Image (cartoon, rainbow, N blue to C red):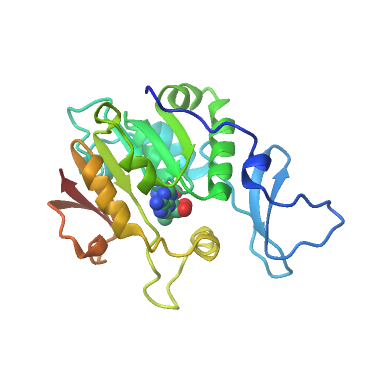
Amino acid sequence: MQGFFYLSSSPVERINLPLIRPTEQARGYQLRYNEDRLELMKTGSNAPGPIYCDFVTGKMGYRLVHGRNKNQPLARALGLKGNPDLKVIDATAGMGRDAMMLASLGCFVLMLERSAIIAALLEDGLKRAAKTTALGPLINKRVRLTHTDSIAYLSKLSQQERPDVVYLDPMYPPRTKSAKVKKEMLMLRELLGNDNDAVALLQAALNCANNRVVVKRPRFAEPLADVPPTRSAHGKTTRYDIYTT
Ligand SMILES: C[S@@+](CC[C@H](N)C(=O)[O-])C[C@H]1O[C@@H](n2cnc3c(N)ncnc32)[C@H](O)[C@@H]1O
């Protein structure tokens, strides 16, 4: 894991957003520390509840500890069977779920996230999970996070620093206005937009992965940038397009 590191400097310095007191009005979005976790929330009377990274409880917590099935589509797409300790860069880390699944399946994962706000939520979730006995050893050994733009980052890697796999899950535009989009995806899309430079990201990934690039897509979506993959692994609602390099 040489060259892989956690974010340095505090989230407040990095994000450079105004700090407000509880009595002050805030419009739009705010990040807040609630008890011991960092949350992103929308303000206003009809606002949905906050979003935050949680790798410990609920479905995700269960899957990370008990769901290490190397026949699942994600594992097949990365070629994990017979290849322990793959070095993976998740170049669109987001809320870190896919990256954490990959770590639990035995990969060394470097998460890259360009949004300072999402990177701060992710860092906070990782730090809390790293304190638990169930996930601490996994995170300390296999997971790192860097706040950066992946296109620039991937294109600067030396031959020795290149990963086996680059994993991509860029934002996918909703198919219809009535599509049932989860609260989290809705907030992320509103905050971050649509990842319109995903074509350049795919190119940077293809130039850098030693073995393959894996792109997560909705099951019936066109391939990213209309570039046909070498092959695909299919899940119920998701497809993983595999580009061997
Ligand atoms: C759909 S989300 C990824 C969700 C993630 N797979 C998960 O399991 O939570 C896409 C994320 O990729 C990030 N992203 C998109 N392009 C990027 C780039 N060039 N560099 C770094 N992050 C990028 C966005 O900011 C967003 O947070």
Q: Residue furthest right?
A: 23
- Residue drawn at x 69%, y 70% as measured from the top left: 46
- Residue drawn at x 40%, y 48% as measured from the top left: 92
Q: How many marks?
A: 0
**Residue 61 at what x, y percent from top left?**
48, 38
**Residue 170 at what x, y percent from top left?**
37, 56
Q: Residue furthest left?
A: 230
- Residue drawn at x 43%, y 64% as measured from the top left: 194
> Foreground: 62 or 227?
227
> Foreground: 74 or 165?
165
Q: Is residue 190 left or right of residue 240?
A: right
- Residue drawn at x 24%, y 25% as measured from the top left: 84
Which quadrant holds the N terminus? top left
Is residue 86 visible in the rendered structure shown here? yes
> Which of the 4 image quarters holds residue 130?
top right
> Which of the 4 image quarters holds residue 174?
bottom left
Which quadrant holds the C terminus? top left
> Which of the 4 image quarters holds residue 244?
top left
Measured along the vertical axis of the image, is residue 133 above or below residue 225?
above
Q: Residue furthest bottom?
A: 177
Is residue 237 visible in the rendered structure shown here? no
Q: Is residue 90 left or right of residue 11?
A: left
Q: Is residue 47 left or right of residue 56?
A: right
**Residue 177 at what x, y percent from top left?**
44, 78
**Residue 242 at what x, y percent from top left?**
19, 49
Measured along the vertical axis of the image, is residue 46 above or below residue 184?
below
